[in-house]
Amino acid sequence: KQHCANAQAVAEYLQGHEKVKWVKYAGLKGDKYYDLAHKYMPNGTCGVISFGVPGGREKVSAFLDHLKMVSIATHVADARSCTLYPAGTTHRQLTEEQLEEAGVGIDLVRLSCGIENTADIIADLDQALAAVQ
């Protein structure tokens, strides 16, 4: 329950952030899976959010480098909040064109919200995004 509540709050925060290009989360109104998510998962969708940090690998790396509480991991769905940058880890062997074809843009960040305090997760993301110039 806490994973879902945190992810909903974080997705809403990210959706309104000027340094975030896009957010994909089925719990957000306007998401193409919103209606299905609420039909089949009325108590919350999940804890994983995808979002875009524009500006290329350097900007995404700057964001990740400044995270203090949220850990960088090559997996998701932990009790602790963690993030994954597919273009720099699991899909690093692909060219930018191949990444786009695979649906893994150069700006894609995956965030798995843990069960920490919601405000703490948002504060960590906020200070890391503030560091992206």
Image: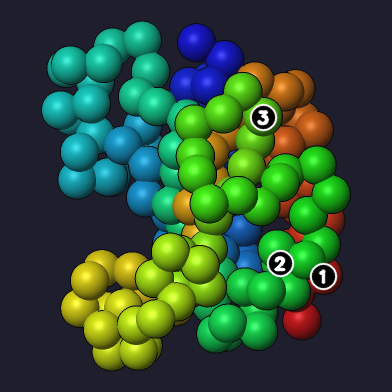
First of labels 2, 3 by sequence position: 2
Task: Name the residue carrying label 2.
Answer: 63
| Left or right placement of residue 37 versus residue 59 in this view | left
Relative vertical location of residue 13 with respect to residue 92 in this rendering, above or below: above
Q: What label sits on residue 131 in the rendered view?
A: 1
Q: Indicate the quadrant where residue 92 lies.
A: bottom left
Q: Which residue is more in the foreground, 95 or 45? A: 95
Q: Indicate the quadrant where residue 102 lies.
A: bottom left
Residue 22 seen by the camera:
yes
Residue drawn at (84%, 49%) of the image: 68
Alpha-carbon span between mark 2 and mark 3: 18 Å
Quarter of the image where the C terminus is located: bottom right
Task: Name the residue carrying label 3.
Answer: 80
- Amino acid type, mark 3: Arg
First of labels 1, 3 by sequence position: 3
Residue 130 seen by the camera:
no
Residue drawn at (56%, 29%) of the image: 78
| Left or right placement of residue 44 versus residue 64 in this view | left
Q: Secondary structure at mark 3?
A: loop
The crowding category of the residue bearing disc 2, from other C-alpha atoms within 10 Å (few below 14, some 14 to 19, many at least 20), is many
Q: Secondary structure at mark 2?
A: helix
Q: Position of residue 108 (x, y in %)?
A: 45, 66
Q: Are marks 1 and 2 in contact (CB under 8 Å)?
A: yes
Q: Position of residue 65 (x, y in %)?
A: 78, 66
- Amino acid type, mark 2: Phe
Q: Which residue is more in the foreground, 39 or 106? A: 106
**In front: label 1 or label 3:** 3
| Left or right placement of residue 32 versus residue 129 in this view | left
Q: Secondary structure at mark 1?
A: loop
Relative vertical location of residue 53 with respect to residue 49 in this rendering, above or below: below
Q: Indicate the quadrant where residue 40 lies.
A: top left
- Amino acid type, mark 1: Ala
